[in-house]
Amino acid sequence: MENKEAKLTFEAALSRLEAVVESMESGEVPLADLLAKFEEGNRLLKQCQARLKEAELKIEQLKKQKDGAAFVPFEGERES
């Protein structure tokens, strides 16, 4: 499942994270499944944070450009 999560867009990962949190908060998830949901949520959270950081770095690069028309390729690390 981790490979599948790595291919999610930011929006899809955030939506899945929200669904995981909502199901955990409902109180209807058996205790045995809570740990698995917590781990999934943690992976999704890290993925979302990494994508947001990448976007922030790209924005900073664009701000530093003098005329705003020259783009510098961004070579960022992606978390798996």
Image (spheres, rainbow, N blue to C red):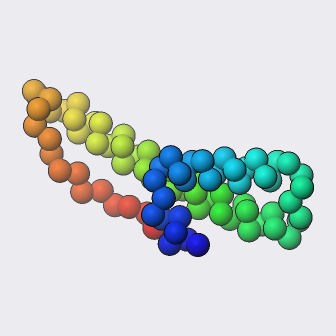
Q: Residue furthest top?
A: 67
State the image coordinates of residue 62 (x, y, percent, origin top left).
Answer: 22, 35
Is 60 in front, or is 13? 13
Residue 56 showing in the rendered view: yes
State the image coordinates of residue 20 (x, y, percent, origin top left).
Answer: 71, 54
Q: Is residue 46 left or right of residue 57?
A: right
Is 56 in front, or is 4? 4
State the image coordinates of residue 48 (x, y, percent, origin top left).
Answer: 51, 50
Image position of 55 with respect to 42: above or below:
above
The quadrant of the image that shows the C terminus is bottom left
State the image coordinates of residue 23 (x, y, percent, origin top left).
Answer: 78, 52
Residue 49 showing in the rendered view: no
Q: Which residue is located at x 55 percent, y 71 percent?
A: 2
User: Image quarter for residue 61?
Assistant: top left
User: Image quarter for residue 70?
Assistant: top left
The quadrant of the image that shows the N terminus is bottom right
Q: Is residue 12 left or right of residue 56?
A: right
Q: Which residue is located at x 88 percent, y 65 percent?
A: 31
